[in-house]
Image (spheres, rainbow, N blue to C red):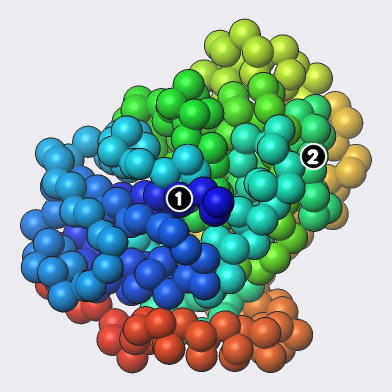
Amino acid sequence: MRPLVSVVIPTYNRGPYCLAAVRSALGQNYKPIEIVVVDDGSIDGTSSLLRSVEGPVRYIRQENAERAAARNRGVLEAKGELVAFLDSDDLWSRDHLSNSVAMLVAHPRAALSFARAAYITDKGHLLGEAPSPRLPPGLAESHEAVRAISKNFVPFPLSSVVARREVLLKCRFNEDRSLSRSEDWELWARIASRYPVVATGKLSVFIRIHRHNTSRDADLAAKAMKRALELAFEDPIAGAALASYREDLESAIERELARLYAMCGRKAEARAELESLSRRKGIHGQRQEVWRLRAMLWLPMPLSTALRATKRALWGARSFVVWRRKRLELQAMGVDFTRVANRDEMQ
């Protein structure tokens, strides 16, 4: 028998996006599924939008407690053996769950599966592939998974993860609000240090990038990443598994913060992070990335932005045929890319 998959969608003031996410889940070619939408205190009419949806959708409302608490609530409410996470502004291609479940069935020791993800705009334009741990398709033992998420402090893309509910009941999202932006990496570190994971190797998740993506706040991102690392090392099993990668992780955090500060024009903070990074031992493998970030600081902002746009365009050109097919699939599932939420809807 096929296992029931519970799709957990936390949402907060993302009504139109959440509706599209629900439709992409309902349009999966895998059955049986149930969808659990946990509304984390929205005031934008999300509940009324979801009333138009037909299918196995449960709507649960709670007082605002952040995404980690909403996801934990969804796991508790779930009835499925497997739990799939989907953020309310992200989308799945039609075969996401079928690919993920097939890998978990084939590898019963794996705690979770993850797929590849790409960034898209509100209007459905492809931007580029999202970072994810570099693991080949198939089973990765615990030490391999820990090494992969440690290399660049890159988590499994959250909206790509399908996990066994029994594991998620033992290893819950940490609800410390200061983690909000890195709570997923901290959880995956605890899970990967205890269980194997499995990679589908398929591009089946699409992450919207828009002006409301909270990960763009560099100061909060800095606090969250450092807190996630601190908590991971407090866990005895995860701490032992991560011990040999501590220098790599701290370097990756400094490099990411330099990138975020450079992108938002805070050049002094970016230079400080790069200076700290350059003093670390064993960064010879990262020198190309450090020089790329230094170039971002030297170049005028419009030129730097143009170079990034060119890089995205080249990736998009290579992936155009695949994305065109995926986009048509999503539109057939009821996702309307012509509707862009206005400022009032997103408040």
Mark 1 residue element: loop
Quick check: can you spot residue 120? yes
Q: Which residue is drawn at 62% across and 56% down?
A: 100
Residue 144 in percent (x, y) is at 81, 34
Residue underneath mark 2? 140
Mark 2 residue element: strand
Quick check: can you spot residue 265? no
268 vs 281, left or right, is left
Residue 92 in percent (x, y) is at 50, 68
Instruction: Indicate whether 344 appears above or below 286.
Output: below
- Crowding near pointer 1: few (<14 within 10 Å), some, many (20+)? some
Which is more foreground, mark 1 or mark 2? 1
Identity of the amino acid at label 2? Answer: Ala
Q: Which residue is drawn at 63% across and 73% down?
A: 128
Quarter-wise, where is residue 201 in the image? bottom right
Residue found at the far front of this picture: 1
Residue found at the far top of this picture: 236
Residue 169 in percent (x, y) is at 43, 26
Indicate which disc residue 300 carries.
Answer: none
Closest to the observer: 220 or 113?
113
The CA span between labels 1 and 2 is 24 Å
Q: Which residue is drawn at 20% across and 59% down?
A: 13
Identity of the amino acid at label 1? Answer: Leu
Residue 292 in percent (x, y) is at 76, 59
User: Dots 1 and 2: beta carbons under 8 Å?
Assistant: no
285 vs 43, left or right, is right
Residue underneath mark 1? 4
Closest to the observer: 156 or 251?
156
Which quadrant does the C terminus fall into? bottom left
Of label 1 and label 2, which has the lower sequence position?
A: 1
